[in-house]
Image (cartoon, rainbow, N blue to C red):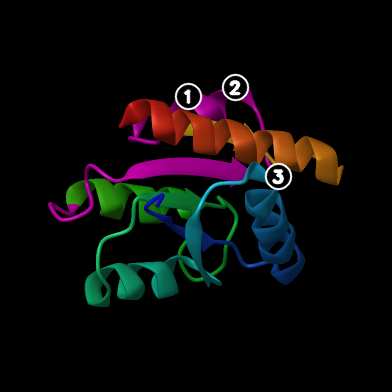
């Protein structure tokens, strides 16, 4: 039996959280998905819950954004090695270089079609699996 990948998604958009879950289901992997609405909720969850295998962050969230969360995750000895993916609507080379420089393992933009989103989510899952 396949051990499920424990994924946490931090995204303030409910529709994006739902679409992400649908896209992960299409990959065929065994997974447990937890979602939070912002970086503050994420950091609280990481302090109070067992370790996750994969953290997926949106950059543009209120209260604490994905970049701030990423920096905090990488500074925390418990989670600094956890695979972190950035999946965000904003995209430019500077942003990508910035988050990769701050410790993100992969950067993908949220496309405007579900099929393209499913492809991006699949790329994130594959990158995580290859990193193990």
Question: Would you say the residues marked 3 and 1 are in contact, meaning their CB atoms lie under 8 Å apart?
Answer: no
Q: What element carries label 3?
A: loop
Mark 1, other Cα within 10 Å: few <14 / some 14–19 / many ≥20? few
Residue under label 3, please give it: 89
48 shown above or below 104 = below
Q: Is residue 93 magenta?
A: yes
Q: Can residue 105 be seen in this view?
A: no
Q: Does residue 115 show up? A: yes
Does the segment drawn in magenta span residue 130? no
**Element at label 1:** helix
Check disc 2 and report the residue beneath it: 93
Q: Give the range drawn in magenta.
A: 76-105
Residue at image mark 1: 97
Front position in the image: 5 or 64: 5
CB under 8 Å between discs 2 and 1:
yes
Q: How crowded is mark 3: few (under 14 residues within 10 Å), some or many (20 or more)?
A: some
Point 19% across, 49% down: residue: 75
Q: Position of residue 42 (x, y in %)?
A: 40, 68
Image position of 44 (left or right of 18): left
Sequence order check, earlier mark of 3 and 1: 3
Residue 68 or 56: which is nearer the viewer? 56
Instruction: Reply above or below: 44 against 16.
Output: below
Q: Do the residues labelled 3 and 2 touch (CB within 8 Å)?
A: no
């Amino acid at each position: 039996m396949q051990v499920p990948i424990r994924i946490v998604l931090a995204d303030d958009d409910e529709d994006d959280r739902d679409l992400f879950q649908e896209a992960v289901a299409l990959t065929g992997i065994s997974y447990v998905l937890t979602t939070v609405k912002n970086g503050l909720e994420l950091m609280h969850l990481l302090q109070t819950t067992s370790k996750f295998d994969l953290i997926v962050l949106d950059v543009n969230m209120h209260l604490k954004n994905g970049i701030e969360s990423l920096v905090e995750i990488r500074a925390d000895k418990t989670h600094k090695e956890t695979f972190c993916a950035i999946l965000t609507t904003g995209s430019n080379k500077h942003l990508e270089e910035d988050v990769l420089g701050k410790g993100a393992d992969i950067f993908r933009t949220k496309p405007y079609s579900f099929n393209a989103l499913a492809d991006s989510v699949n790329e994130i899952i594959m990158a995580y699996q290859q990193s193990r």
